[in-house]
Structure formats: C-alpha cells, structure tokens
Amino acid sequence: MDCIDQRTMISHRVRVANRLFSRLLGLKAKGVMNDVDALLLDPCYSIHSYGMPTDIDVAFIDKQGRVLKSLRNLPPRRLASCHGARATLERFSDPTSSWFSEGEMLVLSYLDDKKVPAIITKME
C-alpha cells in the first residue's frame, strides 16, 4: 500500500458494459453517458465507431489494468483493436480534458456492490 500512497490518484466515473447487448450498443445506447465520464466494455479487444455522431477516445486495457493502446479522436466509421486487451474504455472525444496514455495503470472500483457506475482510478 505504500506505493499507492505516494502516487496521485485521478478518478473517473464509468459505466460498465459487461453483457453482450450493452457492449454491442456501446456509446450509442440511450443515456449511457448520463452522469459518467466513460464507458468500460468488458471483455472487449476490438471496437468500431460506425453510427457514432462524433469522434471518440479509446483506451485498450489488459487484465492487469495497464493501458496497452490509446487513441484520441477516432473518427466515425472506423475499426480499432489491440492484441492482448481485456477491456476497452471509451468516451466521446473531449479536447478540453486529458485521456489515458499507453503504459498507465488503471484500477476499477465498483460502487454499490458491483453495480454501475464504477470508478476508474489512474495511478500517477
């Protein structure tokens, strides 16, 4: 625990999509981004932006929580994937806020006994 205390924690509220239908709809699901910063698709190693009204930011995460690949401003009608990814974090692009970088470690903490939304914490 000592190493965690010496780091800065930055938290983001996320909604978890861990069922087939919720992963298929992704960011296109009505109200999916209400009161949250991003959507976590788990399991997921490949995404598409077909039907998206705007660019999206994407982070592919391995099972240890490390960001393997990070994409900013992925335009509509594109495919992206990452070998070794366990989950994918995505949001509508926001040029005014930071996004995750390759190599960063993320920790997922559920609220209300594994109900959504959850918290993703970036350890710096």
Image (cartoon, grey):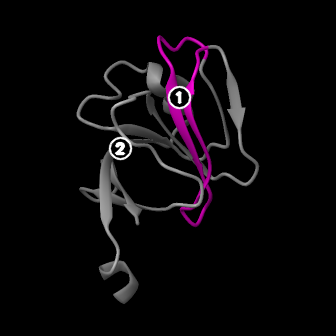
Q: CA distance from mark 2 to mark 1?
A: 17 Å
Magenta-colored span: 50-76
Quadrant where the C terminus sits is bottom left
Residue located 44% across and 43% down the image = 99
Residue under numbered circle 2: 14
- Residue type for callout 1: Phe
Residue located 33% across and 80% down the image = 6
46 lies left or right of 15: right
Quadrant where the N terminus sits is bottom left
Residue located 54% across and 62% down the image = 65
43 lies left or right of 112: right
Nearer to the camera, 12 or 113: 12
Q: Is residue 73 magenta?
A: yes
Tag 2, which secondary structure? strand
Classify 10 Å Cα crowding around label 2: few (below 14), some (14-19), many (20 and above).
many
Name above or below for residue 78 compared with residue 103: above
Q: Is residue 84 magenta?
A: no
Residue 74 picture location, percent across and down: 58, 25
Name above or below for residue 3 compared with residue 21: below
Residue 67 picture location, percent across and down: 57, 55
Residue under numbered circle 1: 21
Residue 123 picture location, percent across and down: 40, 66
Residue 81 picture location, percent across and down: 71, 38
- Residue type for callout 2: Val
